[in-house]
């Protein structure tokens, strides 16, 4: 018997023993190096139904698990394949006494994709694809083996690869080869032969499989509304597979190009369907994010829908105040993170769908602050802990960029270290944190190899991005040095939890060297830090990025804090400067291409570098806001969050990538949703794991604000009106010093 237990936080049943009985299986006639769609099926007879029926699934590729044609689970999450993960579900609600059909629709791509890192080819029996499944039915365990039917389903392929950064090609579904209701795999025609069995997990080259902690989304459909050749999504931006109801002569083609706004661009994805002479409902396997779909065909298209499998946030958390703009910004940020939460956090649902290692630090902060489901927030640090041989993290995990082992973005790994620190603050899970500390150390020692005689990390390989603002990062970058300083400090704090005094000492020594070297960036004449030192010459420009990173990195002497705060907040001296525009301001919503300079190099500053400071783009504003909070200026944050109102002019429901354009839905821009909950309402963990909550509201220009935040023990609700603070909390409350008077209604805080 396989033991059963409940997963502590959400009550999901899990298989409690490590060994698998289900074997890796695949269709015997499947090709090795091609896009392949496989259906696997078995029948199960039940005399009695257990109260719970825990199941788990691992796959080399992707899959949908169905019981009697009803979708139960889809997965697995993308990873480096040597650190694969399995999914869990309870089949109990889907079964009753009698016969049931268990079906797995599984597929692999040909070569790397933005979301797919293939297995290595040499000596690899699983390279073409594989699935392992098992379910505990109480009296027995049913798992994949050679008794399962398995066959390749032809008709799924890829057309010409798209240009730009999309990297996914055009998905092609030829329904002449897709029999019956193939997308639900109800029937397998003709009757398939037995599956080709292999070993049980773990096995080479996959290795041990990790338990994926996140929920899978429940499928829901969004029907698009037709306006000529354009089909629009009434609800705003949605993400999921495309479902078409089509009818046309055999061989007719339906071209569907999605659009994140009104018209498709070269960055938007496309689907092609070939009809078979009958009316069919066909669903894509790839995932699309869109507000509209443009359809070109001579066939009849009766309907277009999006099958949405995103995870709706748990808990009725929200934010309301006497400023409706801030309320709308909070909601747009929450929605942006939701649609950027696929199998893992992705940059955007409408274009790449890559799992960038640095972007997701903001997604995680928002989920910890506003979502009862912390599955992806805890999965992200673990999934991204996929270092190269030199210790540096890839810029993207679980996709083509990691598979190619090419470019790295060093500062992205420093944001990941912050995510490890944040996960410990919120969960208090010292064991999970300790597992990641060797990877954290590997990143920091990678940087230490680039530290020059001054103590500054200088000219590391790869490309230091910071964000899409005009911040010089060649030579010794001040913003990078500040992030490195924060990472050293956070590493020392985490090592203190494990009692590793030797590594604490090393981190502090590195930080001391950095602090001394950082002085070279200070310009006493203009009372500011300059952005970069190149070949011994201090470059003239200064940015919010450098000043904020210096504060969070612990590199600013106390007598300079007032000057640094002024550089961060003097609105009349902040400038919208981006290398995307060489001769003037990158005005908000001007639709510039922010990446153009990557090939040509940064232009010279056009602004007054002695007076003006480069404004941070939405991503790095999380560091700017952290810096202000750190030095006691939380009171400024409500007003600063109003900067995001300009993004609502572009799209009301989601937040754009930059002030001037980019994608219309980029979760790295969602900092206000975090801050309105954690800084304006002031709800944060006072101790790791939220055994005590700190409530330190700072309303700024607001007269009233109300909302709640999740903890492992239940929600904390805060209402602030003037100097009156009301807190409902399941755990002890520590009130911030700035709370002049308060009333507290608390639930029983005994745990």
Image (spheres, rainbow, N blue to C red):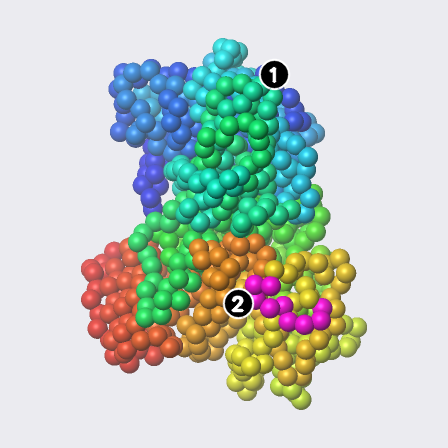
**Nearer the camera: disc 1 or disc 2:** 2
- Residue 433: percent from left, percent from top: 48, 54
Q: Which residue is mark 2?
A: 621
Q: CA distance from mark 1 to mark 2?
A: 53 Å
Quick check: can you spot residue 246? yes
Assess whether mark 2 and mark 1 are in contact (beta carbons under 8 angstroms).
no
Quick check: can you spot residue 358? no
Q: Which residue is mark 1?
A: 29
Is residue 445 shown above or below 383?
below
- Residue 106: percent from left, percent from top: 52, 27
Q: Nearest the camera: 263 or 282? A: 263
- Number of numbered markers: 2
Where the N terminus falls, by quadrant?
Answer: top left
Q: Residue at x 28, y 22 (%)?
A: 96
**Mark number for residue 147?**
none
Is residue 399 shown above or below 498?
above
Q: Residue at x 56, y 81 (%)?
A: 572
Give the magenta range.
582-590
Q: Is residue 513 left or right of residue 17?
A: right
- Residue 281: percent from left, percent from top: 46, 26
Is residue 107 shown above or below 713?
above
- Residue 691: percent from left, percent from top: 32, 60
Could you tell me what secondary structure mostly forms the magenta stretch?
A: loop
- Count neighbours of disc 2 (C-alpha within 10 A) and say few if under 14, some if 14 to 19, many if 20 or more: many
**Tag 1 secondary structure:** loop
Residue at the far bottom in the pictured view: 525
């Amino acid at each position: 018997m396989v033991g059963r237990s409940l997963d502590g936080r959400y009550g999901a049943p899990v298989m409690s023993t490590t060994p698998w009985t289900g074997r890796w299986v695949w269709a015997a006639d499947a090709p090795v190096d091609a896009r392949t769609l496989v259906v696997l099926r078995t029948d199960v007879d039940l005399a009695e139904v257990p109260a719970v029926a825990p199941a788990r699934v691992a796959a080399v590729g992707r899959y949908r698990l169905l019981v009697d044609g009803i979708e139960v689970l889809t997965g697995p999450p993308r990873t480096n394949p040597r650190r694969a993960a399995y999914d869990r579900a309870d089949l109990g609600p889907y079964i009753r006494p009698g016969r049931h059909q268990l079906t797995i629709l599984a597929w692999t791509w040909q070569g790397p994709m933005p979301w797919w890192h293939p297995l290595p080819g040499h000596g690899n029996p699983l390279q073409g694809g594989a699935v392992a499944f098992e379910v505990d039915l109480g009296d027995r365990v049913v798992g994949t083996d050679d008794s399962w039917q398995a066959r390749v389903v032809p008709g799924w392929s890829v057309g010409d690869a798209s240009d730009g950064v999309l990297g996914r090609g055009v998905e092609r579904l030829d329904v002449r080869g897709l029999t019956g209701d193939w997308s639900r795999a109800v029937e397998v025609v003709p009757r398939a032969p037995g599956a080709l069995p292999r070993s049980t997990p773990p096995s080479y080259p996959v290795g041990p499989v990790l338990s994926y902690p996140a929920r899978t989304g429940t499928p829901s459909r969004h029907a698009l509304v037709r306006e000529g050749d354009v089909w629009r999504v009434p609800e705003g931006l949605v993400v999921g597979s495309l479902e078409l109801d089509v009818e046309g002569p055999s061989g007719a083609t339906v071209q569907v190009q999605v659009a994140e706004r009104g018209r498709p661009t070269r960055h938007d994805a496309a689907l092609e369907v070939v009809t078979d002479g009958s009316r069919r409902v066909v669903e894509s396997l790839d995932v699309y994010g869109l507000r509209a779909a443009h359809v070109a065909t001579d066939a009849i298209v009766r309907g277009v829908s999006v099958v949405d499998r995103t995870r709706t946030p748990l808990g009725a958390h929200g934010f309301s105040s006497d400023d409706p703009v801030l309320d709308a910004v909070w909601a747009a940020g929450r929605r942006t993170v939701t649609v950027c939460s696929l199998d893992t956090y992705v940059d955007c649902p409408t274009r790449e769908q890559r799992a960038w290692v640095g972007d997701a630090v903001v997604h995680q902060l928002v989920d910890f602050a506003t979502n009862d489901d912390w599955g992806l927030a805890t999965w992200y640090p673990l999934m991204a802990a996929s270092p190269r041989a030199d210790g540096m993290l890839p810029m993207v995990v679980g996709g083509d960029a990691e598979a190619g082992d090419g470019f790295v973005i060093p500062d992205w790994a420093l944001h990941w270290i912050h995510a490890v620190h944040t996960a410990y603050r919120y969960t208090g899970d010292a064991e999970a944190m300790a597992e990641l500390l060797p990877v954290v150390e590997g990143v920091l020692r990678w940087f230490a190899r680039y530290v020059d005689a001054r103590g500054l990390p200088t000219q590391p390989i790869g490309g230091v991005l910071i964000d899409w603002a005009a911040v010089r990062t060649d030579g010794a970058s001040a913003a990078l040095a500040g992030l490195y300083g924060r990472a050293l400090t956070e590493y020392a704090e985490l090592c203190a939890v494990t009692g590793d005094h030797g590594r604490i000492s090393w981190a502090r020594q590195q930080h001391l060297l950095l602090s001394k070297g950082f002085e070279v960036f200070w310009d006493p004449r203009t009372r500011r830090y300059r952005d970069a030192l190149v070949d011994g010459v201090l470059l003239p420009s200064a940015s919010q990025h450098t000043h904020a990173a210096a504060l969070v990195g612990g590199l600013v002497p106390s007598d300079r804090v007032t000057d640094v705060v002024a550089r961060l907040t003097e609105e009349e001296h902040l400038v919208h400067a981006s290398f995307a525009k060489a001769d003037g301001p990158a005005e908000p919503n001007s639709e510039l291409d922010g990446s153009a300079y990557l090939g040509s190099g940064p232009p010279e500053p056009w602004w007054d570098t002695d007076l003006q400071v480069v404004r941070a783009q939405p991503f790095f504003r999380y560091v700017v806001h952290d810096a202000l909070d750190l030095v006691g200026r939380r009171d400024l944050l409500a007003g600063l969050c109003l900067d995001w109102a300009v993004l609502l002019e572009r799209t009301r429901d989601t937040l754009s990538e930059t002030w001037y354009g980019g994608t219309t839905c980029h979760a790295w821009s969602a900092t206000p949703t975090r801050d309105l909950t954690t800084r304006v309402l002031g709800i944060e963990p006072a101790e790791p794991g939220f055994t005590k909550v700190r409530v330190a509201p700072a309303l700024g220009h607001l007269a009233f604000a109300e909302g709640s935040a999740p903890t492992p023990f239940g929600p904390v609700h805060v209402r602030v009106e003037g100097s009156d603070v009301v807190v409902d909390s399941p755990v002890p409350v520590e009130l911030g010093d700035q709370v002049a008077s308060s009333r507290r209604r608390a639930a029983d805080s005994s745990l």
